[in-house]
Image: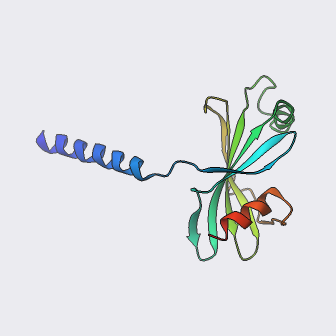
Amino acid sequence: MRVKLFLLSMVAVGMMAASAFAASPDWFKLDENEDSSFFFDRSGVTPLREGVIQVRTRVVYSDQGRKDALKVLAELPDSTPLYETLYSYEINCAEREGHLLAATHLDKKGGTLRSTDLSAVTEWEEFPPDTRMGLVIVQACTR
């Protein structure tokens, strides 16, 4: 019984320590238009291997942008309270290319509406400098 209690205590302490060290997102606005605002998480850059990183981005929709996004996301009804989408990308800094790993669609309270692992179905693509992901490369690959 004492061993079990000790182990549970150690797990709880480990979880608290891990959450204390986990960086909260540092969303930096890179772009904005009539449909959405686009953010890059400056604290969410993770080195994967030499010259390759993983990054997180965020799109917060305007009313019109929300409607347009729901047209693309045909599996979600028009009445879905879509507020934002979080994306995870793998980026090769030297090649200025990357691919989408995952997308999570959220409501305004942060509730998950739909989350999709896309790593097996997306291909690597070039991110030109004049695109939103090109702006991410400028920020993330100079760190």
Residue displayed at 66% across by 29% down: 108
Residue displayed at 72% across by 33% down: 83
| Quadrant of residue 71 within the rendered picture | top right
Residue 14 lies, with reference to residue 141, above or below; the image says above
Quadrant of the image containing the N terminus:
top left
Left or right of 135: which side holds 52? left
Give the x, y percent position of residue 99.
73, 61
Residue displayed at 73% across by 60% down: 136
Left or right of 138: which side holds 44? left
Residue displayed at 76% across by 68% down: 97
Give the x, y percent position of residue 103.
69, 46
Give the x, y percent position of residue 118.
69, 52
Q: Residue furthest left?
A: 2
| Quadrant of residue 64 within the rendered picture | top right
Give the x, y percent position of residue 122.
75, 58
Residue 79 lies, with reference to residue 82, above or below; the image says above
